[in-house]
Amino acid sequence: MSAADLDDAEDAWAEFLTHASNIYSKLRAACYGHPRDWGWYGKKLDERSRDPLLLYVHKARNTATHRLEDITVQVKAGRQRTVAVGIGWVNVRFPNHVRPLPVTDENGNIYDVPTTHRGFTFGYCEVGVMSHITNKYFQDLIKEAFSRLR
């Protein structure tokens, strides 16, 4: 994600979440009334409900749109001691970034910030990483949808 400052990065994240939701809305409209395509779309919704990153993106968009709590926090550059998978404790320097926060749905269910997507684990999650990984998924999803055109 490229943004001039952290406020712009938060705005870009909110816009990204809206576009992510729009992808599913458009796929739904395209598949409606076509049984074979509707089944495919249902499988994609099932995948979204099972994959931690895709589910978080969906729930974060709903929270940003329908609730009052913040979905991100701005993190200033600094140092942090953290656990690296397979290494142990390490000191990490990091730039300014926007970190997602856990989100709550309309039923009070809390969705933690994801650390996996399709079996891939990422240790520290910030919105730039999340948008990059999710965008790659959506590119593949759209490509698959176009390959199904009648």
Image (tube, rainbow, N blue to C red):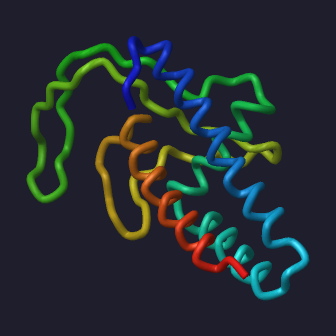
Q: Looking at the image, which residue is at 40% across and 12% down?
A: 5
Location of residue 37 with respect to 134 vertically, above or below: below
Q: Nearer the viewer, residue 101 or 129?
A: 129
Q: Nearer the viewer, residue 35 or 62?
A: 35
Q: Looking at the image, which residue is at 68% across and 24% down?
A: 69
Q: Looking at the image, which residue is at 73% across and 63% down?
A: 27
Q: Looking at the image, which residue is at 68% across and 77% down?
A: 149
- Percent of width and height locating residue 128: 39, 35
Location of residue 27 with respect to 71 vertically, above or below: below
**80 relative to 114 in the view: left or right:** left
- Percent of width and height locating residue 31: 80, 72
Location of residue 139 with respect to 68 vertically, above or below: below
- Percent of width and height locating residue 150: 73, 82
Of all residues, the one furthest to the right in this rendering is: 33
- Total labels: the figure holds 0
Query: Residue 78: which quarter of the image?
Result: top left
Placement of the N terminus among the 4 image quadrants: top left
Query: Residue 62: which quarter of the image?
Result: top right
